[in-house]
Image (cartoon, rainbow, N blue to C red):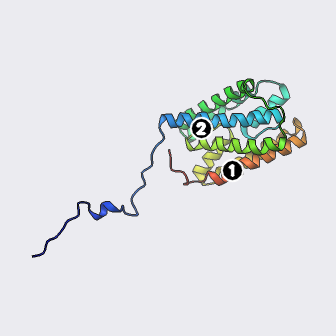
Amino acid sequence: MSTTTTSPVSEPALSAPASAPVQVARHGRYEDAQALFSGSLFVGIAMMMYAQAGLLTGSTAGLAFVLHYATGLSFGGIYFLINIPFYWFAWKYVGREFTVKTFLSVALLSVITEFGPQFIHIDYLHPAFAAIAGGLLMGTGVLFLARHRSSLGGATIVSLYAQDRWGIPAGKVQMAIDCVVVTLALWVVPFERVAWSVLAAVVMGIFLAVSHRPGRYAGQ
């Protein structure tokens, strides 16, 4: 008489089919808050480095730098006002959650750049170091925000939309727009500083092109 032993765990439970959908864990509010603060802080530090070294960046931040250098007005206030029209684009084409998070990130960055110099000051900062370290810091901050469905407005909104809609890497779009904006600043900033600023934009763009690709990151 033969005895058949039944395993308490059936075989299908031991190994999921290859076609089984991957469960994606959504970010919680605490995770979003941490990422928005960290990303905005990293970018804020990069902005303060650029300001001290006489550099600038692209997108709406670049335009804010140009106006800041030309008029002496507050960078944080100019930056916040310039981004207002882009909220409409983000609300219409990207989504409400993205727009709200972007608004919070821009507001936080404006506050950091406005009051940050009261808490940090570097006695000597070479433009080359500011360009490389600032580009990496800014790229890291933008990546934090992008992975939590936020941005710093302006060209970042357009570049992320182009990636989601047409599959064009956000880093390449950001790099192209930033280099154009930085080049347009020649009438305000000396050529040497513009050249260092282009280097910063390239460093940031390469970082994003390598680190932020469609389908690589599943968190939401």
Query: Which labelled disc corresponds to residue 207?
Result: 1
Residue in view at x 69 percent, y 37 percent: 43
Tag of residue 90: 2
Q: Is residue 91 visible?
A: no
Q: What kind of residue is marked 2?
A: Ala
Q: Position of residue 185 (x, y in %)?
A: 84, 39
Q: Residue furthest left?
A: 1
Secondary element at image label 2: helix
Within-10-Å neighbours for mark 2: few <14, some 14–19, many 20+: many
Residue 122: % across, % down: 79, 32
Query: How many labels sit on residues?
Result: 2
Query: Quadrant location of the N terminus?
Result: bottom left
Q: Earlier in the sequence, mark 1 or mark 2?
A: 2
Please say if 103 is above or below 143.
Answer: above
Residue 177 - label: none
Mark nearer the viewer, 1 or 2: 1
Label 1 secondary element: helix
Whether residue 83 is visible here, answered yes or no, is: yes
User: Could you tell me if the residues under marks 1 and 2 are in contact, i.e. CB atoms within 8 Å?
Assistant: no
Q: Residue 149 versus residue 46: which sits nearer the camera?
A: 46
Up/down of 9 relative to 88, above or below: below
Q: Amino acid at mark 1?
A: Phe
Is 76 displayed left or right of 66 in the figure?
left
Quadrant of res 140: top right
- The percent coordinates of residue 92 (x first, y second) are 56, 38
State the residue at coordinates (57%, 41%). 93
Q: Is residue 101 left or right of residue 174?
A: left
